[in-house]
Image (cartoon, helix red, strand yellow):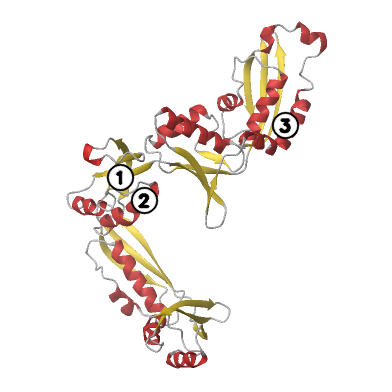
Amino acid sequence: MKTLLRKLPTRFLLTQFGSIAICLGLLCSAATAQTQPTGSATAAMPASAYKLIEVKVAGSKRFTQDEVAAASGLPVGTTAHDEDFRKAARHLGETGVFASIAFTYSYSSAGTRLTFQVTDADKFVPARFADFVWFPDQDLRKKIHERVPLFNGELPTTGRLPDQVSDVLQALLVENGIPGHVDYLRTSGETGQLEAIDYSVSNVTIRVHHVEFIGSGAGELPLLQTAAEKLSTRQYSRALLNSFVEHALLPIYHERGYLKAACAPPQLKVVKPDASEENDGKHEETLVDVTFPITPGIPYKLSRWEWSGNKAIPTDSLQPLLHLKAGQTANTVQLEDDLRTIQILYSSQGYILATVKADAVFDDVSGTIDYHLAVNEGSVYHMGELGFRGIDNNLEARLRAAWKLRPGDVYDATYLQQFLPQARKLLPPTIDWDVSTHVTALPRDKTVDVDLQYMAKAPK
């Protein structure tokens, strides 16, 4: 789940953190009551007494004293008074990186010593930069940290720090003459919890211009180049490159025994278009060359298979479903297909929740691999209720009669795909039918209910 964040007016943000600021003020007043000079003592203080000679930070495990001091706006050498300390504490609180902040200070003829007592916020998430192709990630993080000292690659889930990072990113675009606009998204994971804060650039089209590979062997390079043709001229995104690595690049190596092949983060280079590549000038376009750094590793050959956990189906029946034989080059792409075939076999015999896990043992000296295939068969499920929706009683009776699995029969998960083409022949041919299937496994009863919903789309 992703939610686009629009920056809030400053006035709203100050109001939002008003309660924090008040609490900070109370804490600061209490903390400084014993050290603040009063009366004639204050009047007698020389101007040098208000110059910060030391800023300490206690309680933080995330940030250094220098980072907090810089973020507060009160680095060593600053001339400051009580109200300045309150404003600094309030400013730090609004970032969201601290759960609580207090401060103490003391004057002397040598100057003022200030101490912030803080507690780090509980929840931080990574900051991710989707398409800032003009800056290498490391340089980008460094530039942000220089202007936002409390940014270290992660952001708090509340507070203004994400906005401060957005402001810096926008400034970097302006300084480099890039006419884009920075937005950010709060991205949630499958559980609904905040997973990351993703920054992106809008109003600029970024396209993949050229793709190269370094570290690839002569045998794999032509295959990689062919696969990369799908990337050329595509609109750039980090997700696009990650998907290419996972689903195209690495499988080329995994099919050829390079089971530990790895690809480092792609290297990006913004290039100027040739005269023939220039756009119509109606919109901004950036071209980027992409280089994939590959470490192939060594190729492996299969040494042996070992099975465990398979009781319902003997090894002699399962082993022929594996294409790879001992002594052949390992191929995990083929192995994944074979394991799916084995799971389908189990599901056809009622073991609809059966799984097969392949544990690999590598021998880098001999360049071989042993596989231990652990089968978890689970329970046998039987046919439960069969339901039809969207059709009249006569048609339902015909379809129900054609369904061969009766209540209590061992459930065959492959049967539904056989039934649907047969059932379509029984439907009125003058109507274009759309069917949606709902298969529900009931663990308590170890049964499977099947519900078929038909919808007449339109007459032919």
Tell me the quarter of the picture where residue 65 sits: top right
Q: Earlier in the sequence, mark 1 or mark 3?
A: 3
Q: Mark 1 belongs to which amino acid?
A: Val
Q: Earlier in the sequence, mark 2 or mark 3?
A: 3
- At 42% from the left and 83% from the top, the residue drawn is 412
Residue 231 spot, x, y in % from top left: 29, 50
Residue 258 spot, x, y in % from top left: 27, 54
* Label 3 crowd (10 A; few <14 / some 14-19 / many >=20): many
Q: Is residue 42 above or below residue 60?
A: above
Which numbered dot is residue 240? 2
Whether tag 2 and tag 1 are in contact, CB under 8 A, the answer is yes
Whether tag 2 and tag 3 are in contact, CB under 8 A, the answer is no
Write down the residue under mark 1: 208
In the foreground, 426 or 199: 426
Q: In this rendering, would 199 be left or right of 344? A: right
Write down the residue under mark 3: 24
Q: Mark 3 belongs to which amino acid?
A: Leu
Q: Is residue 363 above or below residue 162?
A: below
In the foreground, 93 or 327: 93
SS at mark 3 in the image? helix
In the foreground, 270 or 267: 270
| Distance from Cα at disc 2 to Cα at disc 3 | 46 Å
* Label 2 crowd (10 A; few <14 / some 14-19 / many >=20): few
| Distance from Cα at disc 1 to Cα at disc 3 | 50 Å
Quarter of the picture holding the C terminus: bottom left
Residue 340 spot, x, y in % from top left: 36, 71
Check the image and name the residue furthest to the left: 218
Q: Mark 2 belongs to which amino acid?
A: Leu
Residue 293 spot, x, y in % from top left: 29, 43
